[in-house]
Amino acid sequence: MNRLLVASLLSIAWHASTLLASAAPLDLAKAVVVAPAGLSGPEKKAVAVLREEVEKRTQILFPVTDAWPAEQIPVITVGPASLVEQVAGSYASLLAAERGEIRPEGYRIRTVTDRVAPAMLVVGNDARGVLFGVGHVLRLLHMAPRSVRLVEALNISTAPRYPLRGHQLGYRPKTNSYDAWTVSMWEQYIRDLAVFGTNAIELIPPRSDDDDDSPHFPLPKIEMMVEMSRIADEYGLDVWIWYPALDKDYADPKTVALALEEWDAVFQKLPRIDAIFVPGGDPGHTQPKYLFALLEQATKVLHQSHPEAQMWMSPQSFNQEWMEEFYQLMQQEPAWLTGIVFGPQVRVSLPELRAAVPERYPIRRYPDITHSLHSQYPVPDWDTAYALTEGREGINPRPLGQAVIFRTLQSYATGFLTYSEGCNDDVNKFVWSGLGWDPDAEVLEILRQYSRFFIGDQSTDDFAQGLLALEQNWAGPLLTNAGVYTTLEQFQAMERSASPQVLLNWRFQQALYRAYYDAYNRSRLLYETALEDEAMDRLRQAPRTGSLLAMEQAEAALGRAVTHPVAQSWRARVFELAEALYQSVRMQLSVPRYKAIAVRRGANLDEIDVPLNNAPWLADRSHEIRKMAAEDDRLRALDEIVNWTNPGPGGFYDDLGSLASQTHLVRGLGFEKDPAFLRSSLVGFGLRTTHPWRYSWRNHAESLNDEPLEVTYAGLDPTAQYKVRVVYAGEPVPGIRLVANDRDDIHPFIEKEIPVRPQEFDIPRDATSGGTLTLTWYRTPGLGGAGRGCQVAEVWLIKQ
């Protein structure tokens, strides 16, 4: 039985107790650290972490000794139980009496204040337990310049619920910051993660679906990979490698031989490898039978340099045919395979996968915590203004949402290593690490510890609440979310009172950047919506003023968004913070300014002024209308614009991507029960267009994989004839089909039209004769990939 599974079984008996008794604060400013002789390398590293992290925040460097001091001074002793008991003197019997079940990675923390010399005992069950015990202490200490205190007595005994708690840290050009990090920056970040209980990192090999080089690289890819493996090993953390199989034809023995040679060269260079994870797709696209054959040989190569390393794979991007082949191969229970990974673009749910995979194989999660749209767990009910500006890889603290994603599915898996594309998802990493240790932990308490340790003692609650407020900024329609301004006011208050050190802190800068950007977005959205309303009023006057003057006046109104912009001080502060973030943590928030690899890769400073109304589409339509020779033709075209959403008497209109206009959309289970939206409709976005699109085409309702998308109507006129007008936006797919009441084909599988335009189809009279109607859309079944394509932007049900 593999050691991850053993650890998982041991952790079923997980237990954690924390007794916090009222007591006078324990002043540790003059404490000495007792580190017994005989500590292992990772245990010595834990002692160094304690001393160095306290010194950074207090200018106090604890002296260290391997024997209990004779002086009556506070003592912090750190180490495994067997060694601490040897040096603890009169405290040894106390430790022995409290010794319980030895659970992997667990620890005990005990403060003793009823003796002449106060003491804090940090006792690990193993080397990792020592490190994680030190991390827990650091999260609870109240630190300020020349001050280190504990405000309450501690009696803690805890061990992690899940044996695998890690994060992917990819040194590659595609990320929005990682590619510029130095070795020292990587060590600090890996240390930060370990303080919160992370026990594994996942690296990316030199060849992946990335450019070969980055202008930001301080070291070549393989050299940094070696350094990161070394760092993790020094801390006693597991090293995984996400290793995509990118060659085109693994049915060719020559291709396999070259791939194995390439992989072996990487394996041999790394000082530590605990596991390899090969995704079935995203990227890579290899039929399961050939992929399994490749990985069987790759496992033998891996064991030549790392005999205990494991091989894992995922069925990502498989179509239905390949999924069935994958299941058949799994029933053969290959001995070389350790476990299965559940990640983005797996076309079945985690419970379904767990039921189909033999029990001997643990399942590890690979959750996407970094992307806000076009992803495994998109932000639910996100406003289009945010999608168009802050984009897919914006700074995205989602603590409560991540807790839903974790808790809904984690019981089916042995643990996780998250999918990350940079430090934009920093808060989410720490939420996952905290919940991986204790799934019942309060999210707010995780955020308080995050804030205390990273921002400072005085900001513990304020910054934690601010992170929750940033998440709420992204909940629901932005036009009506006045809380966005309150969030900014709260962060501005923290900004005014912040020390110079905090103002230079990249985590504080990230939160400020989001608060200012969100508020600027809302201010623009309100303003540009009002300008569009004014422009539409001008167009409605066209029969009286004439079409040409009406269009001129409408364009003048819309143009004030550029000539008389709003909230420019907030915009300027966003740019200042972008520069600060490049200097502090190398965030590349702009392509021209900071050499980000692409706008869609987190460079959302370049999208800050994207129009948040129909101005580009209206300008394009006005250009075409002016070409019409006859005034009557121009007036008819303008009338179509001003009555765009009017379905006529007895009709219905839905802008399915607008949260305020989805009256007839069937939502399904929803985010709380279905955070990946595998059985629910969700709001999606079409961001890359070659022609100016209506704002209502930049968003849509969609369903994933083979799940249908539905709208329902009631109260229809049973004697009337109806037709449906529909706009298919989003992404091109091989086909989309529309059915009424599960029986009447409204149209067969058809290609989406480019450029996008409304299409009309008759509804059979007997489909509405009962006064109700259900319209259902299907994507071509059985496809692999991201699962998107069943996407509908607008629907009119028109009574003829």
Image (tube, rainbow, N blue to C red):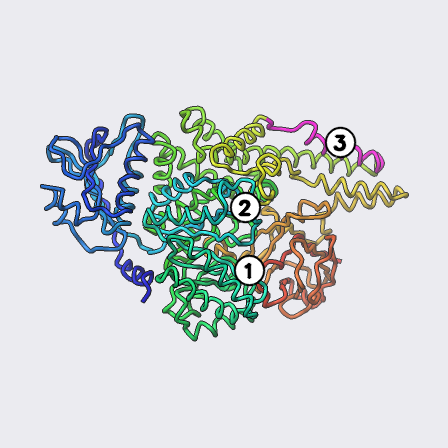
The residue under label 3 is which amino acid type?
A: Ala
Q: Secondary structure at mark 1?
A: loop
The residue under label 2 is which amino acid type?
A: Pro
* Quadrant occupied by the N terminus: bottom left
- In the rendered image, residue 250, in percent from the top left (x then y), is placed at 55, 67
Mark 3 or mark 1, which is nearer the start of the sequence? 1
Mark 2 or mark 1, which is nearer the start of the sequence? 2
Residue tagged by mark 1?
246
Q: Residue at x 78, y 46 (%)?
A: 640
Mark 2 or mark 3, which is nearer the start of the sequence? 2
- In the rendered image, residue 212, in percent from the top left (x then y), is placed at 56, 49
Q: Is residue 267 above or below residue 432?
A: below
* Quadrant occupied by the C terminus: bottom right
Q: Are marks 1 and 2 in contact (CB under 8 Å)?
A: no
Residue 556's disc number: 3
Name the magenta segment's main secondary structure: helix
Crowd around label 1: few <14 · some 14–19 · many ≥20 (10 Å)? some
Q: Residue at x 46, y 30 (%)?
A: 491
The boundaries of the magenta stretch are 545-568
Q: Is residue 504 above or below residue 282?
A: above
Residue tagged by mark 2?
173
